Image (spheres, rainbow, N blue to C red):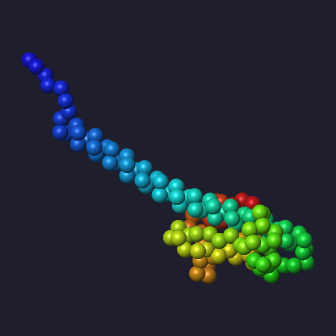
């Protein structure tokens, strides 16, 4: 009795199905990673604004944080970029930092922008500073 070697149609279908499943899982995780990277970058920019706010207020102790403007804290930003850093939302919209609150937040359409689950997790916010 001779046996033929090779793969059956069912085996080939299962292997292809498994490969497609793995490809879809990887694609989904990579898109989530991109969102996480945007949030982490935004939080780092907010931390630099927060440090600039604290440095400015240390030099001007009688001034209130609600009176802060971008022009006042730009010289205190690390690396002296010449402008306030802006963020990009998950939908590629420009986010404007609100420097009148401490710690600062990004705003979109007049309200604070933080699509993460918590307001102190270090994504889209300053975290536990």
Q: Is residue 46 above or below residue 111?
A: above
Q: Position of residue 6 (x, y in %)?
A: 19, 30
Q: Nearer the viewer, residue 28 or 94?
A: 94
Indicate the quadrant containing the N terminus: top left, top right, bottom left or bottom right. top left
Q: Position of residue 119 (x, y in %)?
A: 64, 66
Q: Is residue 25 above or below residue 53?
A: above
Residue 5 lies in what quarter of the image? top left
Q: Is residue 60 above or below residue 123?
A: below
Q: Nearer the viewer, residue 116 or 90?
A: 90
Q: Is residue 112 visible?
A: no
Farthest-out residue, top: 1
Q: Is residue 28 visible?
A: yes
The structure residue drawn at horizontal position 10% and vertical position 19%, both measured from the top left corner, is 2
Q: Position of residue 43 (x, y in %)?
A: 66, 63
Q: How many marks?
A: 0
Question: Position of 97 compared to 21: left or right?
Answer: right
Question: Position of 42 compared to 53: left or right?
Answer: left
Residue 59 lies in what quarter of the image? bottom right
Residue 44 lies in what quarter of the image? bottom right
Q: Nearer the viewer, residue 41 or 113?
A: 41
The structure residue drawn at horizontal position 69% and vertical position 65%, both measured from the top left corner, is 45
Indicate the quadrant containing the C terminus: top left, top right, bottom left or bottom right. bottom right
The structure residue drawn at horizontal position 64% and vertical position 64%, both measured from the top left corner, is 42
Q: Position of residue 8 (x, y in %)?
A: 18, 35
The structure residue drawn at horizontal position 89% and vertical position 69%, both measured from the top left corner, is 58
């Amino acid at each position: 009795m001779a046996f033929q070697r090779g793969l059956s149609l069912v085996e080939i279908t299962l292997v292809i199905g498994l490969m497609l499943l793995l490809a879809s899982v990887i694609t989904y995780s990579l898109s989530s990673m991109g969102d996480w990277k945007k949030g982490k970058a935004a939080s780092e920019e907010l931390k630099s604004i927060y440090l600039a706010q604290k440095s400015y207020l240390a030099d001007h102790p009688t001034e209130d944080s609600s009176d802060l403007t971008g022009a006042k804290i730009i010289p205190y930003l690390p690396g002296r970029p010449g402008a306030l850093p802006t963020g990009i939302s998950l939908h590629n919209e420009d986010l404007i930092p609100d420097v009148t609150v401490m710690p600062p937040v990004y705003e979109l359409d007049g309200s604070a922008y933080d699509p993460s689950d918590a307001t102190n997790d270090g994504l889209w916010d300053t975290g536990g500073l």
